[in-house]
Amino acid sequence: MTQMEIPTTFVDKARFVKAIFTDVEREYDFLLRVMTLSFDWVWRRPMCSKMNFSADVLVLDLACGTGLVTFELSRAVSDSALIVGLDLSPAMLYVANRKKHTIRDGRDRVDFVRATGEYLPFRTSIFRYVTIGLALRNFADKLAMFRDARRVLLASGWFLSVDFVRPEEVTVWKLYKFHIFHILPTIGGLVSRYWKRTLIYLANTILKSSTVNETTGALLDAGFQHARSEKMTLSIVALVFAQK
């Protein structure tokens, strides 16, 4: 098993994550599908299904990467709605903006901003939803991010995140650990040394990830209410959501 030292302070981890997701952006969408056996959309759909798009809505998609969730949400909302994708990686946002100019359905309802989730460049109480798709583990200071996400949400707005977690069942964890620490980095190494590095990083973030109970507890500490969770696919993925 390949261990990787991941910074824990906000500035150092932000720089580290920015570097980790540089030079992998072009193949990101395709390889994510390959690595997850196309389950990534299966995991995201329950999150999207909890959102009400019947009215004009403003949504903030944190750690949006190449915009996979952002564009999916844009196709579900009305023409006067807006989905804002936010990420700290210029490389990932470059791909997201290129995709925006090539797609037809929903592109006018999308905008992208480069910033960190811990310090959001938005005024208070403007978004109906804040979402994160498979990226909660990338934040250095989750409590600070939860607090600022709550700040920018409207009254009764919702925070929703779906992400990988460490499964509790011992046999599942042993098989899963072998998969993420050995199989995936090997496949990534066939593409490039950058992808091998990134997949080793992702494996280590899962190894050190917070439990679902710790995450819902942190949401409550940040001032949210009704924090709940739903586990999926042998409990290797969990949806957590809470209301302002």
Image (cartoon, rainbow, N blue to C red):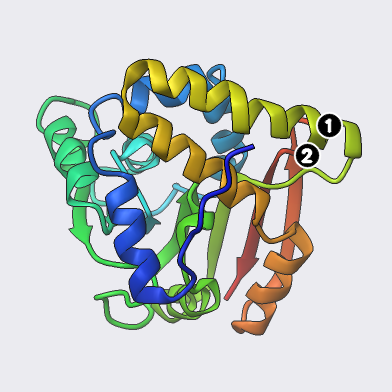
Q: Secondary structure at mark 1?
A: helix
Mark on residue 27?
Answer: none
State the image coordinates of residue 219 (x, y, percent, origin top left): 64, 73
Question: Do the residues under discs 2 and 1 have CB atoms within 8 angstroms?
Answer: yes
Q: Nearer the viewer, residue 184 or 59?
A: 184
Q: Which amino acid, by three-letter code, is at mark 1? A: Val
Quarter containing the N terminus: top right
Q: Nearer the viewer, residue 232 or 75?
A: 232
- Mark 2 and mark 1: Cα distance apart in space: 9 Å
Above/below status of 191 relative to 137: above
State the image coordinates of residue 29 (x, y, percent, origin top left): 35, 26
Residue corresponding to mark 2: 235
Residue corresponding to mark 1: 172
Q: Which amino acid, by three-letter code, is at mark 2? A: Ser
The extreme front residue here reads 2
Q: Nearer the viewer, residue 157 or 63?
A: 63
Identify the residue at horizontal 38%, vertical 57% (top origin): 62
The extreme right residue here reads 170
